[in-house]
Image: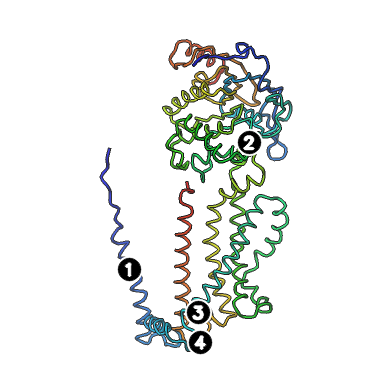
Amino acid sequence: MSFAEVKITKEPLMVILPILSIVAFFGIWQSLLSFGVVPSSLLASPLQVLKLFIAKWTQVNPDGALLTTHMWTSIQEAFTGYILALLVGIPLGLAMGWFPIVEGLARPIFELIRPIPPIAWIPLTIFWFGIGIPGKVFIIWIAGIVPCVINSYVGVKMTNPVLIQMARTYGASNWQIFIKICIPSALPMVFGALQIALAYCWTNLVGAELLAADNGLGFMITMGRRLAMPDMVLLGMAMVGLTGAVIGVIIDAVEKRLLAGIRR
Amino acid sequence: MEDGNKTMAENGNTHAKISCKNVSKTFIQKGTQQVHVLDGISLDVAENEFVVILGPGQCGKSTLLRIMAGLETASTGSVIINDKEVDGPGQDRGLVFQSYMLFAWKTVMGNVEMGPKLRGVGKEERRKVAQHYIDMVGLQGFENKYPHQLSGGMKQRAGIARAYANQPQVMLLDEPFGQLDAQTRIYMEQETVRIWEQEKRTVIFVTNNIDEALFLGDRIICMEGKLPGRIREVYDVNLPRPRKFTDLDFLKLRHEITEASELTL
């Protein structure tokens, strides 16, 4: 039996509409400023932002660093905090899911700290670390660890009890069941945490940099405000979004590759 | 092939491999409500006997199997396997479930060698054992496939191979073919007999399908149709193997069992 291959074409309307919407968005935005409807002290035009974007590759002033330096600082901070959050959060969550002692000891403290927004730690981190990179890493660590713990914990708890019983009939020890059954079953949830934690880390990083920094994309946005340069604020915002999206795509690709063959 | 029906007497074996003594089970639901699932089940199974527990859904038959497996504890009474009272799961019993329960992140080989691996059997040795049982269930060539790449029948073959690879003395199967289509099911039943004849084990096979019970069992334990689960009747199936679903004797016994139970099995 053979079937003619059906080519799935997007409805033309669904191609045209998004393009139209984007063009209209930037067109209206640009014309609002070109025709002086909105004063340039309140908003910069897309073209101005683009001009600044090109200039900032080679020009240090007026905010004290190249665009790439800001980005590199932010990425460094985000990744250090993120990786540390994974390294601590995932094993902790997995252990909490399986060992009652760990759950009993760690869970109350975790529940106590969890509802505090990471940004609320900023004043303390300034006492402890000043406004350099370590303070931001700490904030990001706090932000990232929460989804890591929760997802790993839930992942282990969701392990099919019959699989655990089956392993018991094979004479598996408690530890073996944890390593060989619970952790592999929890993996899809853990990978989910990688994405969620990254999004958390990135948002909170920018928040932290807005408040206490001497470098980084968040700092660039703050400088834009201080210098009354809406184009710099917008450029900073755009770069935060863009970098975040690119990192998300990369993590997604890594996840897909690692999970190949595991997913049902 | 050689000897169709091994009952306890024919084996000359009066010593039971599995012995359930007055097993009852009561679950407590929502704090106070008691549900009597099993009531006074006594049952002796001889070595290498193929015993089928037949009954409709919700008759306690799976619970009885789980008690034998050590996954549940009896409220009263006891189960003795190999002269030892059951007090938890053990390597002497192999389990096969309706829902396959394969390790999704392991290949067929990984699944089958899991038991020996957990017991610390060396790689070469356990590969040999696993390969033997993979061949036995007819999955050669699929060693490196993951469960999601297999059909239902193949998954259950892998499940059976996995249970065997652990070298249990008793096989406990809980409606293993319940999710298969009718054709595959009959084929798997034939395979079950072939495998059992090839590597004799004491088998407890739980099913709600009367044809399956008659095709497989040396003995059929027919349960009451409602809770609390009790044994209604025990039938010796003295039909030569390989059996045929359309043989007159087969149909006569089928008729007898159907008439005796008010169930449409």
Mark 4 vs 2: CB contact within 8 A: no
Alpha-carbon span between mark 3 and mark 4: 10 Å
For marks 3 and 1 on the same chain, the one whose residue lies earlier in the sequence:
1
Name above or below for residue A12 compared with residue B105.
Answer: below
The amino acid type found where label 2 is placed reads Thr
Is residue B265 visible in the rendered image? The answer is no
The lab-note entry on whether marks 1 and 4 share a chain reads yes
Eye-nearest disc, 1 or 2: 2
Counting residues from the start of the chain, the first of labels 3 and 4 encountered is: 4
Q: As shown in the figure, which amino acid type bears the numbered disc 1?
A: Ile
> x%, y% of residue A244?
48, 69
Q: Which of A121 and A27 is in front in this view?
A: A121
**SS state under label 1:** helix
Extreme residue in the left direction: A4
Asked if labels 3 and 4 share a chain, the reply is: yes
Marks 3/1: CA distance? 31 Å
Counting labels gives: 4
Which SS class for mark 4? Answer: loop
**Residue contact at pointers 3 and 2, CB within 8 angstroms:** no
Q: Distance between the residues labelled 4 and 2?
A: 66 Å
Residue at disc 2, secondary structure: helix
**Measured Cα–Cα span from mark 1 to mark 4:** 37 Å
Q: Where is residue B27 in the image (x, y as percent from the top left)?
A: 69, 34
On residue A169, which mark appears?
A: 2
Q: Name the residue under label 1.
A: A19
- From the viewer's perspective, is the residue at label 3 or at label 1 nearer? 3
* Amino acid type, mark 4: Gly
Tell which circle, 1 or 2, labels the residue nearer the N-terminal end: 1
Residue designated by label 3 = A70
Place of residue B142 in the rendered image (x, y in percent of width and height, measured from the top left): 44, 38
